[in-house]
Every structure is written in structure tokens, then in C-alpha cells.
Amino acid sequence: MKRIFYLFLICSIAAKNASSQDLKPKKVSIFYGYVDQKGITVIPYQFKEASEFSEGLAKVVKGEKTGFIDKTGKTVIPFEYDRAFDFSEGLAKVMLNGKAGFIDKKNQLVIPYSFRDAGSFKEGLAMAVNDKVGFIDKTGNVVIPYTYDSAKAFSEGLSSVSLNKKSGYIDKTGKTVIKFGYDRANAFSDGVAIVVVGGKFGVINKTGKLVVPMDYVVIYNFINGVTQATKTGKIVNGEIEEAKWALIDKMGKALTDFKYDEIYAFEEGDLALVKIGDKYGYINRQGKEVVAVKYEGILGFRYGLSLVMLENKYGYIDYTGKVVIDLKYDDAREFSEGLAPVMIGDKYGFIDQTGKVIVPIKYEGTEGFSEGLASVQLDGKSGYINKEGKIIIPFKYKSAYPFTGGKALTFGFNEKHVYIDSKGNEVKQ
């Protein structure tokens, strides 16, 4: 099932007290940085790749090498690895010269580079690969021999492993506890696991008993006891088509009718976007439609509000479906640093989350706010304003793009491109 992705333009503040914030990676232009829950930039855009924080550190890439930063943006593990993976149970898998090993948070090599590949530690063990797959402990000792063709991380005391094109489950001693009879077998979660036989999906418990019949074309992974599932449709080039979806619990009880063309992942507000025909709404984990399936366009909740469109007018709703900013705009975008671009007629301005106009609706276009400034167009020229609407960099460019890492790309009317700083001074790329 397809997923919706969102692009957010975001602005910056100082990184002090960042360690107490919930930070998320965001991409602006070609670089990643980190923003807080309000979309305010805390760690500037400077990384080629960036991951979620795990155990207080985030894996990031500069150039061709990978390192780790803390929530202030400080580099705590240098950029010296070919590849690296998130910290899990105090250790991170790293790759160097084609071999995998494990480091601790002090960048000490705890388990040498002796594996062709490896997985992260879960429940005290990590998958390790040489010619076959086995498991190691945190000292690097092989505790389950290299026997299997593939394996998944341990979850709830069991690991799904495959041998000779069939999958089953082993415990931490390597004993087979659920026989090898599945074409695919997912990890256990909430006491159940999704299995596949002959292209049909079902669910088993830890004794191997089938608790949800093998009647489904697709069942997605359970999260907090519920998931999306369908009994209809067909899979074409890895995508499922002509399916009708329902929300089910881990015992197979349908919490909604099989009527949705799409049920997307649960996100902010613990709500899932749903689609019937060309209309959108939201359901909760109990299957209740908390936002009626009536909107022609909708973007996921961010900072408590969702942008919606009905009869070609845009506005914003809250988690209950209540319209908190009237659907009166001819165009609108997501909130960033508390402000959102909106359009009436052919002019743009900015509103706050109460709907109050903060920057007058008079501009011909905007790229939105990033790092405290917004590129806007007036009389065919582009410049930059702050959140009070004050002109910070004059209108003299043919086009101007958002600030990332303290710099912005601009084009003059002679088609020459230059990078500028937040005062409008030309700087190197």
C-alpha cells in the first residue's frame, strides 16, 4: 500500500536545551537537519543522510562517511565509518572495509570486524552473517551456530529463521519451537506473528496455533494491537491493486468494514488517514471515523492541525474533525514554526495556528519559512522577510530558495546563481 510523504519547510533556533526535546530529521533542499515538535530547526541542515535518535545518539552522514551526533548537534563519534546503524542495547553495528563490527557510545570497538554482515542487538543477541546466519552475544561469541539462510532479530524470545526456503521459529538456545512450514514468517509482536503460505496471510500465536485464518491477501504488521488487512485485490509489481481494506485486531476481528481503498499508517494524534474513491477522512484505533470521509484533499496532521480541501477551498481541522481555520483559502500549506502560507485570489500571506493573519496577504508567491526567513515574491522580484513581515533581504532576485545551513541559493535576472547568508551577503556554496 502506498504511503504519503510530506515535505516541510522549517526554521531555526539555537540548540540550547535540545537534549530535552524530541527531535526528528527533516530534509530541506539537499541536506538534513533536525527539528523539534513545533518544526523549529534545532540542528542545522548539513547532513547528506540523517536517522532518528536512538539511545540519545543519531547516525548521520557527511561526505561519504558516517558518524553519530547528540541532541545538541555535537559530533560524539567521528565521521570515520563506511556505514553505521542505530544504537541498540548500547552497541551499534558499523561497517569498515566490507566487514561488520560493533562499537559502544565511546567509540570503542567492542566486537571486532569479523563478520560479512550483522544485525542490531535485540534481547541480548545479534544476527551475524558469514557463509550462513547465526547469532552472537555482546562479547562476540557465537551462541547459535551459523546454520540458517536468513534470520530476523529476536522478539518476545523468538526469532524467525529460514532454511531451504521455509521459515520457522527458534528460541535463544537455537531450539526449533515452531516448525519450518511457512513461506514467510514475521517477528512476534503482542504475542502473535504474521505468516504466509502459498501467497495467503494469517496470524499465529507462540504455540504455532493459527489465530487468524489464512484468508488474507495482505496483512500489515500489528502496531499496538491493530493493523490494515485485505481479503481482496491482487499484487502487481509489488503493489496491491483493487483491494478493499479494513482495520483488524490481532485475533482477526474486523474493527471496520472492508470498504476503504486505502488505510494509511497511524501517525500524529493516533489517527490513520483513509480513502474511499476520491474522498479522505480519518479513523482511530477502534475503527471509528473521527473525521468523515468527505475531503477532496488532505495532508497528515502536523502540530495538531491537518490541512484539508473541500470544493477547492483550503482550511485546517483538529484531531476531532472540528474546523478550526475556515475553508476559505484558494491555496494553503503546512505550518512551519507556527506559521502557514495561505492564498486568497492570487496573493499569499501567512497565518498563525488560530487563523490570524500575521503577514499580510499581498505576495505573488512564497517558498515558506526556513531558518527564520521566508522567500517571497512581489512585483516579479524575490526577497526575504521575517515572521513579522519585515523585509530583511531586498527584492532583487529572479528566484530565491529556502535557507539551509545558513545559506540560500538565489538566481539573478542575468541567470547567474549565488549563495547568500541571512544578511544577503554573497557566500561560497
Image (cartoon, rainbow, N blue to C red):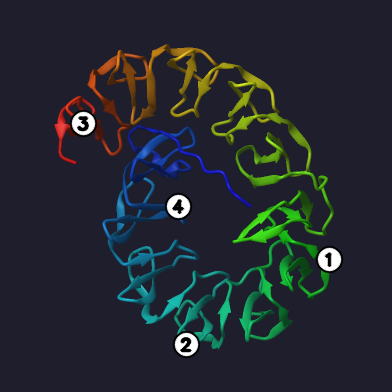
Residue under label 4: 53
Q: CA distance from mark 4 to mark 2?
A: 32 Å
Q: Is residue 173 visible?
A: no
Mark 4 or mark 1, earlier in chain: 4
- Residue nearest the viewer, comparing 203 with 92: 203
**Mark 1 and mark 4 in contact (Cβ < 8 Å)?**
no
- Under mark 2, the amino acid is Asp
- Residue nearest the viewer, comparing 265 with 37: 265
Mark 4 or mark 3, earlier in chain: 4
Q: Looking at the picture, how far across and down is residue 427, in whole percent?
A: 15, 35
Q: CA distance from mark 4 to mark 1?
A: 38 Å
Residue under label 2: 131
Q: CA distance from mark 4 to mark 3?
A: 29 Å
**Mark 1 and mark 2 in contact (Cβ < 8 Å)?**
no
Q: Mark number for residue 213?
A: 1
Residue under label 3: 421
Q: Looking at the picture, how far across and down is residue 371, in whole percent?
A: 33, 31
Q: Is residue 404 above or below residue 353?
A: below
Q: CA distance from mark 2 to mark 1?
A: 36 Å
Q: Which of the two discs, 4 and 3, sits closer to the camera?
A: 3
Q: Is residue 372 above or below residue 272?
A: above
Circle 2 Cα neighbour tier, 10 Å, few/some/many (<14 / 14–19 / ≥20): few
- Under mark 4, the amino acid is Phe
- SS state under label 4: strand
- Under mark 3, the amino acid is Asp
Q: Is residue 374 visible?
A: yes
Q: Residue at x 68, y 67 (%)?
A: 188
Q: Which of the two discs, 4 and 1, sits closer to the camera?
A: 1
Q: Mark number for residue 312?
A: none
Mark 1 or mark 3, earlier in chain: 1
**Mark 2 and mark 4 in contact (Cβ < 8 Å)?**
no
